[in-house]
Amino acid sequence: MPFQPNPTPPPAPLPGIPQAPRARGLQILLTIAAVIVIGAGIRATSGIITPILAAAFISMLAILPLGLLQGRLGVPRWIALLIVLVLTIGGALGLGYYLSQSAAALQPLLPTYQARLDELVLGALETLKAKGMAIDPQQAMDAMHSWKLSDFADVIVLQAARLLQDLVFVLLVSAFIIAEASSVPMKIKVAFPNAASNSALATVADKVKSFVIVITELNIALAAINYAACIILDVPFAFLLSFLVFLLNYIPTIGAIAASLLVVAITLLTHGWGTAIAMAIVQAASGVFIGSVLQPKLLGARLGLSPLVVFLSLVVWGYLLGIAGMFFAVPLTIILKIVLDSTDDLRSLSVLLGDAASARDAARR
């Protein structure tokens, strides 16, 4: 047997000299590089990711009546699946048709709204000038005319046209997700027995589903209040405005403000200051009650995200996926936080994403 010399033992650390963590700096650099590469990949493939996320969102809402039909009502699986698919696809196509008709009806009225806006702004500038402010109303009006309502509407119509182009793909993917929904838990248990025994996957699904369901219910309530206010105050395009309120409130804080300002602006252009102030009071009261009272009570601490992280997630996901990323910012951040929390090396990042209650729970563990 050939002679094998003993390996040289590593040198003992010198007494009194602290030893730096081995390759800690390299690990941090690799993590940052991986985040940048993943972010660039998400941004480059946003055209594919966004419709898939929209399909997953629609499917998550459609699976609820599917479970109700199969579980409580005892409807056979294929009949329940057919009912849900018909309602989902028919509802989406009907809504798309109505919104396109509403946009077509709104287009001829834009010059009238533009003239009314000019009148209101000029009156306000004249009032400020009369009170002694150094304002040139005509110069301000010329600067304001660098953009028009028609230009803003054209951008919205263009975005809507792109959305309708993806609608067929979104509905097709949604149909396949809904059809596979009942067999997914069984597949996960068979394919990933260790993950199935761990509650991480179930926690992700439960938290995201809870958030989507609660926010959808609250947005429906806000849309209903807005629709009633528009009918009472005789504001045109009541359903269209209510749908925009429902949709924009999926974007935390910023979406709610934008939706309220849009409704108040349309009310101002069509009915003047008195009715607009009344509509503003309705928007503020409903927003405060639902956003500050009902939402924390219904969601509680199930999200576990810091308010700062929620705001920053809008910026990050909006940059990566565009406007659609802002709609999915909170669910995606919840998924990211839970994935980080289930990884020993990256659990500290999960703590940074969480709120104070989550940090205290992590400290107890």
Image (cartoon, rainbow, N blue to C red):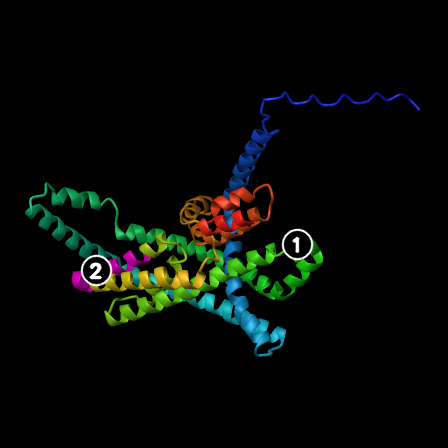
Residue farthest along the front direction in this orientation: 16
Name which residue lies at 21% across and 64% down: 278
Tell me which numbered mark, 1 or 2, is placed earlier along the sequence: 1
Disc nearest the viewer among 1 and 2: 1
Span colored in magenta: 258-275
Name which residue lies at 60% across and 26% down: 19
**Main secondary-structure element of the magenta-colored stretch:** helix
Residue behind mark 1 = 195
Mark 1 crowd level (few <14, some 14–19, many ≥20, 10 Å Cα): some
Q: Position of residue 206 (x, y in %)?
A: 54, 60
Task: Indicate whether 33 appears above or below 108.
Answer: above
| Position of residue 151 in the picture relative to residue 127 (left or right) | right
Frontmost residue, 223 versus 153: 223
Quadrant of residue 72 within the rendered picture: bottom right
Q: Amino acid at mark 1?
A: Ala
Residue 104 visible somewhere in the drawing: no
Badge 2 marks a residue whose secondary structure is: helix
Q: Which quadrant, please, contains the N terminus?
A: top right
Is residue 23 shown in magenta? no
Q: Position of residue 8 (x, y in %)?
A: 76, 21
| Position of residue 134 in the picture relative to residue 149 (left or right) | left
Residue farthest along the right direction in this orientation: 1
Frontmost residue, 316 versus 90: 316
Residue behind mark 2 = 268
Name which residue lies at 12% across and 53% down: 123
Q: Position of residue 256 (x, y in %)?
A: 34, 57
Frontmost residue, 110 versus 43: 43
Q: Amino acid at mark 2?
A: Leu
Is residue 271 shown in magenta? yes
Number of the label disc, if any, that sits on residue 121: none
Badge 1 marks a residue whose secondary structure is: helix
